[in-house]
C-alpha cells in the first residue's frame, strides 16, 4: 500500500519523548480509505505510537474528503499539541486537515485553497438529486472545521468555497486560516510578521472567469455596434451571433432545462 504520510523521530528517549514530525505529501488517500478499515487504523496506530507534541508538515493538493475528515478528527483528539506547517500547498481536503492544528504556520511562498466538494455520479434525476444533497452535507461538514478555526460566518465561508479561493500566507492569516508565517532564523522555523514585506493576496477562479467573460462581451458587442454606425450600412444577414446573443441564448436554455 502506498502511503501519503510519513513519520520522523517516532522513537522516544529515556529522558523525554522525541520531537515527533509527520509529513503529509501528495494526494490524500491515493489508493484506499473510503469504506476501508485498514488504512485509517494504520494511521491511528502510528499517531498513538508515541507521545509528546507533533509538528505536521503539509504539501498536498488534496484528495479524499472522507480521509481528510478522519485525519482531522484524529489530530484534533490527540493529547499533545499539534502544530501544522504548510511549506508548499494545502488545497481542498488538505486545507481541512490543516485546520486541526492548534497553531497553523505557512511559508511565505505557500498557498492555501478552499473550494466546494466534488464527486462523480451516474443515474436518473433521483440519483443526481441524491448526489447534490450529499455534496451539500459534505460542504456543511467542511465549513464546520473552517468556522472553528477562523471564526468567520458560515455565509462568508460558503461564498469563499463557491468561488474556489486561493490565499497566500498573509491572506490566510488575515482571514484566520493560519496563525502566522514561517521564516528561517538560526536554522529553525518561527512566527514572523510579513505584512510589510508581502501583500495579502486572495484569488478567486470564478471571479476571474466572470470578469473575463464580461470583458469579452463588452469588447466585441461594442465593436460590432461601432462598425455599423461608422459605415451607416446595414449589416448583412448572417447566421453568426455575437457573444451577447450567445449568452442570452444560454440563459434561455438554462431556464428551460
Image (cartoon, grey):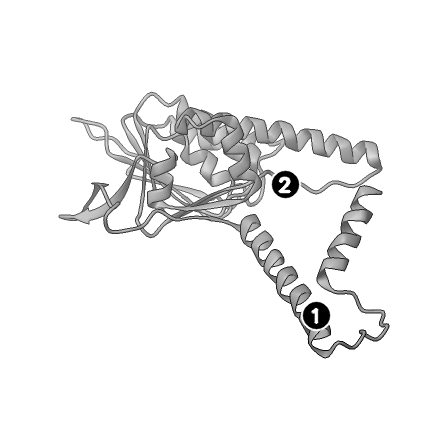
How far is mark 1 from mark 2, CA to CA? 40 Å
Question: Which quadrant holds residue 237?
Answer: bottom right
Residue carrying label 2: 118
* Residue 54 percent across, percent down from the top left: 31, 32
| Horizontal arrangement in the rendering, residue 149 relative to residue 245 (left or right) | left
Residue at position x 58%, y 58% in the image: 212
| Horizontal arrangement in the rendering, residue 255 relative to residue 159 (left or right) | right
Tell which of 24 and 136 is nearer to you: 136
* Residue 132 percent across, percent down from the top left: 71, 33
Tell which of 245 and 161 is nearer to you: 245
- N-terminal of the pair, mark 1 or mark 2, is 2
Report whether residue 219 is seen.
Answer: yes
Tag 2's secondary structure?
Answer: loop
Residue at position x 57%, y 32% in the image: 66
Q: Is residue 166 above or below residue 50?
A: below
The label shown at residue 224 is 1
The label shown at residue 175 is none
* Residue 166 percent across, percent down from the top left: 46, 47
Residue at position x 24%, y 34% in the image: 19
Residue at position x 33%, y 44% in the image: 170
| Horizontal arrangement in the rendering, residue 86 relative to residue 236 (left or right) | left
Tell which of 18 and 183 is nearer to you: 183
Callout 1 crowding tier (Cα within 10 Å): few <14, some 14–19, many ≥20: few
Question: Which quadrant holds residue 21?
Answer: top left
Tag 1's secondary structure?
Answer: helix
Amino acid at each position: 500500500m502506498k502511503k501519503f504520510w510519513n513519520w520522523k523521530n517516532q522513537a522516544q528517549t529515556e529522558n523525554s519523548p522525541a520531537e515527533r514530525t509527520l509529513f503529509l505529501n501528495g494526494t490524500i488517500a491515493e489508493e484506499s480509505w473510503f469504506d476501508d478499515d485498514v488504512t485509517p487504523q494504520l494511521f491511528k496506530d502510528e499517531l498513538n505510537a508515541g507521545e509528546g507534541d507533533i509538528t505536521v508538515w503539509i504539501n498536498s493538493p488534496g484528495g479524499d474528503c472522507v480521509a481528510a475528515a478522519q485525519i482531522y478528527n484524529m489530530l484534533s483528539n490527540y493529547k499533545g499539541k499539534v502544530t501544522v506547517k504548510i511549506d508548499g500547498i494545502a488545497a481542498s481536503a488538505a486545507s481541512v486537515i490543516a485546520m486541526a492544528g492548534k497553531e497553523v504556520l505557512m511559508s511565505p511562498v505557500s498557498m492555501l485553497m478552499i473550494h466546494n466538494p466534488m464527486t462523480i455520479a451516474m443515474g436518473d434525476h433521483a440519483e443526481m438529486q441524491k448526489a447534490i444533497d450529499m455534496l451539500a452535507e459534505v460542504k456543511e461538514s467542511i465549513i464546520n472545521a473552517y468556522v472553528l478555526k477562523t471564526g468567520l460566518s458560515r455565509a462568508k465561508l460558503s461564498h469563499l468555497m463557491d468561488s474556489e479561493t486561493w490565499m497566500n500566507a498573509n491572506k490566510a492569516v488575515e482571514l484566520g486560516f493560519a496563525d502566522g508565517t514561517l521564516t528561517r532564523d538560526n536554522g529553525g522555523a518561527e512566527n514572523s510578521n510579513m505584512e510589510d514585506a508581502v501583500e495579502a493576496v486572495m484569488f478567486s477562479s470564478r471571479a476571474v472567469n466572470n470578469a473575463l467573460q464580461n470583458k469579452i462581451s463588452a469588447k466585441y458587442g461594442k465593436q460590432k455596434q461601432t462598425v455599423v454606425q461608422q459605415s451607416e450600412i446595414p449589416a448583412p444577414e448572417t447566421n453568426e451571433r455575437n457573444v451577447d446573443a450567445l449568452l442570452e441564448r444560454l440563459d434561455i436554455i438554462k431556464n428551460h432545462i
